[in-house]
Image: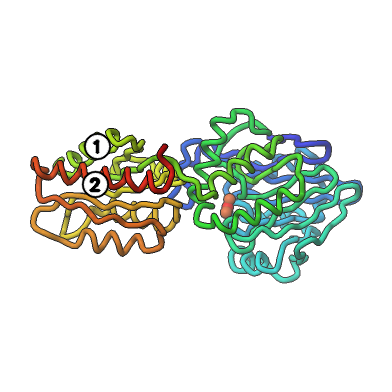
Amino acid sequence: MIRKIVEGVYNVGAIDWERTLFDEIVPLPQGTSYNAYLIIGKEKTALIDTVEPEKYEQLERNLEEMKVDKIDYIISNHAEQDHSGSIPMVLGKYPEAKVVTNAKCKEFEKDLLHLKDEDFIIIKEGDTIDLGGKTLEFIMTPWVHWPETMTTFLVEDKIAFTCDFFGSHAATTHTFAEQYDRIYHEAKRYYAEIMMPFRQIIGRNIEKIEKLNPEIIAPSHGPAYREPGFIINAYRDWISEKTKNEALILYVSMHGSTKKMVDALVDYLGKYRVEMKVRDLITADLGEIAIDMVDVTTIIIATPTILAGPHPNAVYAAYLANALKPKAKVIGIMGSYGWGGRTVDILKANLGALKGEILEPLLIKGLPKEEDYAKIEDFAKKIAEKHRELGVMK
Ligand code: FEO
C-alpha cells in the first residue's frame, strides 16, 4: 500500500499486521510497520530506509506500482535490520543505487549485511544531496537508539525522517497519526522499551529536530505526525525528571504469602494517598510494565523465596528495570521466605544501574502474621513520606 505524504514523497514501506514480538523480547499487541520513503526529485530519486527482509515483497510491489525504474540513493538512517535488511535486495533490483549513510552506519552494515565499500557514499552532519527541487540534509542523532542513528531532513517540504526516533509499533493504514490516544500509548511503549535507557542524550536530539522546525515528522515505525509538537512534547515529558505520585508493584507469589503482603501494601499505600499500578509477573505484558516504569516514582519488586533466592520472574523484572534505567526515585524489595535465602542480595545485584534509593527491604517468614501487617504499613508510610519529600504528592 502506497501512502502519499506530500507531492513527490511517498511511504512505500510495509505493514506487519501479524508480528507479535520484536527482537524476540518486546510484545507487539498492535503489530508494527517498517516505513520506507520514496522521494522523487526532478533529476534523482532516493529511498529513505527499507523494510524487514521478510516483508521485502511489499516494498518491491509498491516500487513497481510507482513505476520506479531507477533509484539513485538509498538513504540509510539506521543499521538495524528492520530498516536496513532489504538494502541488498534493493541494490539487486537497482544496481546503480548507492547507500548514503554516515561512517559508523557503514561499518555496521558491512558487518550485518555484508555490503562492500563501493556500495556506499559517506555523509556527515549538515551534508546535503540535491535531488532536483528536493534537498536532503543529514542530521546526526546518535543513540536513538544505536550509536549510528541519524535523521534525514527534506528541506523544501520540511519533513524530518527520524527512523526509530518518535516511532510507534502500530500496524495501521493511516498515513498520519489520527487516533491520538492509541498512538500516544504505542509511542510511549516504543519509547519505554527502546529509547528510555538513552534519556539524557535524547534531550539533545530533540533540540536538533526542533531547530529544523519540521512541519511533518515521519518515523520508520507507525504513522507520521502532521503536528510534530504532539510527539515532541510527549518525549520532553517522558525524558524529564518529573515523576508521578505512583508506585509500580511487580509481584509474583507461589502459595499466596507474597500476594497477601502485596494486597496489604496496596491498602496501606491507598490509605497514605499513593497511587499504584500492580502487575503479576507471571501474566503481565512486559511492554506494559516498561510503559509503567516511564514515570512512576517508586518501583517495588515482591517475590517469594525459591531455591534460596528470588523467583526467576522477579530477577527478570529487576534486570529489565536495570537495563531500561527508568527515572524512579525509590526502589522497594519485599517478599516472603521459609528458611532463609539470598533474595535481597540477588535482587540488589540486578538493580545496580538504577539511581533510585533502595529502601530497607521487607521480608516476612511464611504467611504474614498480625505484627507483620504493622511492618507492611510502615513500609507504605515510608514510601508516602518519600513521595512527599520529593514533592510528587500534594
Ligand atoms: Fe526499528 Fe532500531 O530498529
Q: Tell me how many marks there are.
A: 2
Residue 223 image position (x, y, % from top left): 64, 37
Q: Residue 242 placed where, x, y %?
A: 50, 46
The image position of residue 131, as x and y in percent, is 87, 52
Residue at left offset 59%, top offset 28%: 179
Task: Provide the secondary structure element on which disc 1 rests.
Answer: helix
Q: On screen, 200 above or below 110?
A: above
207 on left or right of 389: right
- The N terminus sits in image quarter: top right
Q: Which residue is mark 2?
A: 379
* Above or below, 166 relative to 223: below
Secondary structure, mark 2, is helix
Which residue is pictured at 37% across the width and 45% down the height? 387
Residue nearer the viewer, 201 or 189: 201
* 124 vs 223: above or below: below
- 384 sits left or right of 18 in the view: left
Give the number of the disc on residue 268: 1
Amino acid type, mark 2? Phe
- Image quadrant occupied by the C terminus: top left
